[in-house]
Image (cartoon, rainbow, N blue to C red):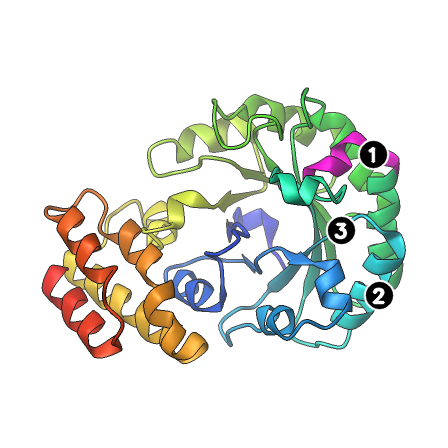
Amino acid sequence: MIDFSQKPLVLAPMAGFSDLPFRDVVKKFGADLTISEMISSNALVFESKKTLKMLQKNESEAPYIVQIAGSNEEIIKKAVLILNEFDFIDGIDLNCGCPVSKVIKQNAGSALLNDLDLLKRLVDTIKKHSKKRTVSVKFRLGFKDKYPKLIARACEEAGADFVSIHARTAKQLYSGKADYEAILEAKEAVKIPIIANGDINKDNFKEVQKSTKADAFMIGRASVGKPWIFYELKHEKSISKELKKELILYHFEAMLKHYGKEAVKLFRKHLHEYSKTLANAALFRATINQIEAENIMIKNIEDFF
């Protein structure tokens, strides 16, 4: 399903950004694997309509993995049984990396790095009950300290088919330098494939490849406002200004199709990112923040870009 010999490029799960329309866009520009936004196992089990909508995928998304978060074995099992009913899902990923306080308070996300026995039991639960082709784990180097080898081995022993590693501790959040050598430590400690993640961009991609010797590379924040980064990394060249404009309009149309009228407001954050570094970006942002009608939004996008 995932050919790690080809060093695939993966879109990281990002709350509020890696939704269905955004995943559609990155697939057009060469992302090999896409993962849903983090989905609460509790919300999934109690059948939140919004949560079930988050499971949807584009036709182009193959393979497609759903990421779940949680810390209760029974709830995780029930969530997996629900996911088994959706044939279009190819794999299940357990989030052991989210450093956000509201997730940590539930003993989920990166809080699981403080209890590797529980982490192993959760992965084992998914493995035993999942009918999907892969089970994977996304984690950080540790909670406060770094112990990537221990975490990677725990995941492997519990049955994970591969892991994704963000090159920071939970305590670092998204600040400080990413430690790619620590990913290499984990890589050398296990036999399963390793996906490197954390601050990977056009400027450091070759360095990260060399430093981590990873089997695949996961792009997160560097794709927000620049979803064409997957094309640029693969082909080592930039896309034209005209194509960028066409892409931004396509992204907005995809948002409208998925969210309806709400898309106008939701797309503002994307336009803030798309317009970064461009002349008169501040005025453009101030203008689009007041727009409610989709036709006026389209006109402003066409004029600015």
| Residue at position x 78%, y 71% in the image | 82
Query: For the residues marked 2 and 1, what is the alpha-carbon distance in whole angstroms?
Result: 21 Å
Q: Position of residue 305 (x, y in %)?
A: 14, 60
Please state which of the two labelled residues, at mark 1 or mark 3, is closer to the viewer. 3
Q: Earlier in the sequence, mark 2 or mark 3?
A: 3
Residue 190 seen: no
Q: Which residue is mark 2?
A: 78
Q: Quadrant of residue 63?
A: bottom right
The residue lying furthest to the top in this view is: 145
Q: Earlier in the sequence, mark 2 or mark 1?
A: 2
Q: Is 203 one of the magenta-colored residues?
A: no
Circle 1 packing at 10 Å, graded few (<14), some (14-19), many (20+), is some
- Start-end of magenta stretch: 110-117
Instruction: Establish if 284 lies above or below 222.
Output: below
The N terminus sits in image quarter: bottom right
| Residue at position x 47%, y 45% in the image | 219
Q: Which mark is residue 13?
A: none
Q: Is residue 294 left or right of residue 205?
A: left
Q: Position of residue 66 (x, y in %)?
A: 65, 61
Circle 3 packing at 10 Å, graded few (<14), some (14-19), many (20+), is many
Q: Which mark is residue 70?
A: 3
Q: Amino acid at mark 2?
A: Lys
Evaluate if marks 2 and 1 touch, with contact meaning CB atoms under 8 Å apart.
Answer: no
| Residue at position x 60%, y 49% in the image | 4
Q: Which residue is mark 1?
A: 116
